[in-house]
């Protein structure tokens, strides 16, 4: 028992703590656009820690700390041995920044599987520089691959759920008594404490507001691409923007999404009060923010709430756009009688969206085949009741750009079913979609599709996270072989989209210079 207490002393220590939450550097394919991070998770964590009296700073390692030239970080594009391009600070520079800053612990944000090794290399550099600095990790990817993270030997604990209540406890309590964490004991065995009701607040309004003031707004505004993407409405200058989340969880359980497997209440749909959201908007406005990006996974799940929310934000004079959570079923008024067997398009709601700033809304059709939708996408698109071609024409006539996303190549999807999606994508383009993009589904860790892929022999358990990107069909033994699937996808993108769009895409890609440096 005494040995165990000595081993855990550093985590239980009551000495003054100082924390740094890090967005690690990014690695990208050459055809991808470099972007900073700025996502909400670290901002919530920083606010929660400071509420407990723990000074906490934020570092987006893709752009570096204040005063550092972007030529040495964001615009320093390093070709790595894996063929990917790294942007951001060198890992030794991050470690030096941590040590010189006197930080006693670091929290690493890891949401995306292709960035796994960026988190690993960041943690390794910090531990090499000072093994006494505690390194924690959280985010969808970290909690889904907690074994891989812990086996590196460079992480003290992994948060298996929302971290606002857990991370402050890890700084002062024995992790054996904390639900929602995984860690190594003194014998290097992995201990898993599954999440329970103590891990997250039952009311989201109990959480402190995200610490947006810690974001490097001036740096983000100087870049050629925003963290949340760019729209097609012709805007060139990046206005001050920030993410916001008015709800957590989702009402749907799509197999390709991590929420399909979230345990207990973490995947349950929960909302902030309208009053709290308005307070957050007021705070963002006081910080000079002009444009808000919603990160909700199911933004329109409560439609009347959404109407009230959008109207109040509109009255504040801010522009709002969306990143996630806009499902096509929400654009139909299902309270009205069917017309010719179809739901009526909710034109007043679409007009409110446009008036509030939604000049571009991604059109997530997912598939043109109803069987695939029912099996993998919760049946949230119902082709027999939703006239998506009419919806596309309506949005186009209202001046709302609606680029289409579709997936082809699920494990049991036939070539005939894939062709159905491609032909439907062609019809959507003819109805007014500015472009249609076909993606091959990726079995990301944490999703039901990941479990299906492992159990069905479509994915090796020791898969390379660097390859888990949209360019590479990573599942094998599928009905349509991956090599053929890649060819079908590329040909479909050429077939469906007009030559003008393809030319513009090539021009955008050619506009970035990738300088190869030894890493």
Image: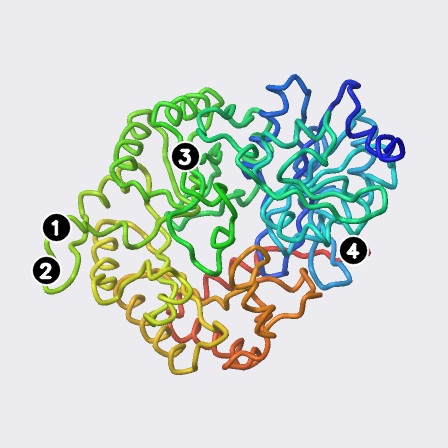
The location of residue 231, given as percent across then percent down, is 42, 48
Q: Residues within 10 Å of mark 2 (few under 14, many from 20)?
A: few
Q: Earlier in the sequence, mark 2 or mark 3?
A: 3
Q: CA distance from mark 2 to mark 3?
A: 33 Å
Secondary structure at numbered mark 4: loop
- Neighbourhood count class around disc 3 (C-alpha, 10 Å): few under 14, some 14–19, many 20 upward: many
The alpha-carbon separation of the residues under discs 4 and 1 comes to 60 Å
9 up-or-down from 77: above or below? above
Residue nearest the viewer, comparing 415 with 230: 415
CA–CA distance in space, label 2 to label 1: 9 Å
Residue topped by disc 3: 246
Q: What is the spatial separation of the Cα atoms under label 2 and label 4, in whole angstroms?
A: 61 Å
Are circles 2 and 1 on residues that touch, CB within 8 Å? yes
In the picture, the quarter occupied by the C terminus is bottom right
Q: Secondary structure at mark 3?
A: loop
Mark 3 to mark 4 CA distance (whole Å): 42 Å
Q: Are marks 3 and 1 in contact (CB under 8 Å)?
A: no
Could you say which is closer to the camera, residue 362 or residue 417? 417
Q: Nearer the viewer, mark 2 or mark 4?
A: 2
| Residue indicated by mark 1 | 336
Q: Name the spot of residue 375 as percent of width and height, x first.
A: 40, 67
Q: Residue at image x 63%, y 47%? A: 143
Residue of label 2: 339
Q: Which residue is mark 4?
A: 517
Q: Secondary structure at mark 2?
A: loop
* Marks 3, 4: nearer the viewer: 3
Q: Is residue 380 left or right of residue 229?
A: left
Judging from the image, the colouring scheme is: rainbow
């Amino acid at each position: 028992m005494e040995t165990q207490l000595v081993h855990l002393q550093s985590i239980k220590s009551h000495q003054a703590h100082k924390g740094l939450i890090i967005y690690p550097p990014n690695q990208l394919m050459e055809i991808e656009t470099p972007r900073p991070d700025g996502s909400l998770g670290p901002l919530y964590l920083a606010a929660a820690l400071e509420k407990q009296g723990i000074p906490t700073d934020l570092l987006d390692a893709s752009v570096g700390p204040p005063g550092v030239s972007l030529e040495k970080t964001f615009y320093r594009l390093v070709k790595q041995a894996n063929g990917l391009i790294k942007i951001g600070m060198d890992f030794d520079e991050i470690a030096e920044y941590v040590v010189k800053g006197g930080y006693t612990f670091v929290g690493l944000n890891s949401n995306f599987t292709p960035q796994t090794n960026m988190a690993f290399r960041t943690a390794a550099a910090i531990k090499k520089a000072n093994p006494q600095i505690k390194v924690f990790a959280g985010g969808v990817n970290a909690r889904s691959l907690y074994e891989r993270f812990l086996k590196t030997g460079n992480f003290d604990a992994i948060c298996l759920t929302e971290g606002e209540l857990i991370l402050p406890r890890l700084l002062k309590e024995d992790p054996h008594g904390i639900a929602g964490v995984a860690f190594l004991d003194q014998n290097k065995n992995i201990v898993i404490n599954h999440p329970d009701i103590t891990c997250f607040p039952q009311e989201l309004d109990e959480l402190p507001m995200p610490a947006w003031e810690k974001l490097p707004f001036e740096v983000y505004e100087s870049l050629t691409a925003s963290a949340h993407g760019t729209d097609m409405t012709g805007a060139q200058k990046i206005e001050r923007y920030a993410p916001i989340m008015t709800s957590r969880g989702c009402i749907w359980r799509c197999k390709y999404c991590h929420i399909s497997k979230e345990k207990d209440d973490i995947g349950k749909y929960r909302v902030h009060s309208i009053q709290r959201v308005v307070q957050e908007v007021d705070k963002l406005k006081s910080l000079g923010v002009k444009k808000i990006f919603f990160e909700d996974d199911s933004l329109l799940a409560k439609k009347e709430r959404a109407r009230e929310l959008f109207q109040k934000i509109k009255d504040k004079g801010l522009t709002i756009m969306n990143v996630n959570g806009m499902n096509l079923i929400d654009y139909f008024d299902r309270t009205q009688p069917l017309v010719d067997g179809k739901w009526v398009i909710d034109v007043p709601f679409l007009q409110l969206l446009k008036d509030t700033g939604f000049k571009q809304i991604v059109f997530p059709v997912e598939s043109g085949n109803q069987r695939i939708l029912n099996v993998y996408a919760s049946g949230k698109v119902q082709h027999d009741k939703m006239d998506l071609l009419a919806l596309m024409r309506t949005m186009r006539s209202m001046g709302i750009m609606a680029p289409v996303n579709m997936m082809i190549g699920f494990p049991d999807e036939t070539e005939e079913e894939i062709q159905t999606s491609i032909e439907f994508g062609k019809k959507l383009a003819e109805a007014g979609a500015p472009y249609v993009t076909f993606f091959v589904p990726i079995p990301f860790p944490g999703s039901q599709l990941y479990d299906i892929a492992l159990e069905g022999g479509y994915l090796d358990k020791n898969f390379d996270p660097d390859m888990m990107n949209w360019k590479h069909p990573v599942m094998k033994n599928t009905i349509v072989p991956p090599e053929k699937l890649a060819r079908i996808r590329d040909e479909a993108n050429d077939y469906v989209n007009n030559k003008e769009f393809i030319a513009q895409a090539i021009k955008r890609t050619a506009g970035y210079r990738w300088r190869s440096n030894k890493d």
